[in-house]
Amino acid sequence: MLATLRQHGIQPTPQRLAVAKVVLGRDRHPSAEEVWAKVRRRCPTVSRATVYNTLNLFVDKGLLTMQVLREGTAVFDAEVRPHHHFIDERTGRIYDVPWDALQVQGQESLNHYDVRELQVVLRGRRRKE
């Protein structure tokens, strides 16, 4: 984690390392409140503001993306390469869907829009494997 933070120009602090351990390299999509609750288990004195500021710093530095995929709640995603999402309506869990799993067509017909990002959000129920 130290090297990753330094590579992105982030000064490692104990609080930032604690946040990084919760969100980086995970396939979950936690909200800021969920991250704060998990970080507090390791670092009981960490403030909510510190966690929120750290998450925003990670987004600014390209370590995370922030998206509104749950009802009115921003979530943080450690997978920063292009991909889609599937939201299980039963559990609320968000899964990454590889970019190549879906074929999106018709962007060229959107000539009145300056599209900077494209992603598909699928909703349904995940089947048992």
Image (cartoon, rainbow, N blue to C red):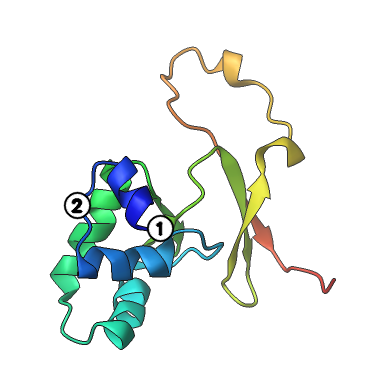
Residue 127: give x, y in percent of width and height. Answer: 81, 70
Q: Which residue has dot 2 on it?
A: 11
User: Who is closer to the viewer here, 49 or 90?
Assistant: 49
Q: Residue at x 40, y 70 (%)?
A: 22
Q: CA distance from mark 1 to mark 2?
A: 20 Å
Q: How would you rate the neighbour count of disc 1 (Cα within 10 Å): few for under 14, some for 14-19, many for 20 or more?
A: many
> Where's residue 119, x and y in %?
56, 39
- Which residue carries the number 1 mark? 76
Label pair 1/2, CB-CB below 8 angstroms: no
Q: Is residue 79 above or below residue 47?
A: above
| Earlier residue among tags 1 and 2 | 2
Q: Which element is circle 2 on? A: loop
Q: Please name which of the two marks, 1 or 2, marks the residue nearer to the observer.
A: 2
SS under mark 1: strand
Q: Amino acid at mark 1?
A: Phe
Name the image quarter holding residue 83. top right
Is 9 left, or right, of 83 in this rendering? left
Quadrant where the image shows the N terminus: bottom left
The kind of residue tagged 2 is: Gln
Evaluate whether residue 125 shows in this view: yes
Q: Indicate whether 34 appears above or below 118.
A: below
Numbered badge on residue 105:
none
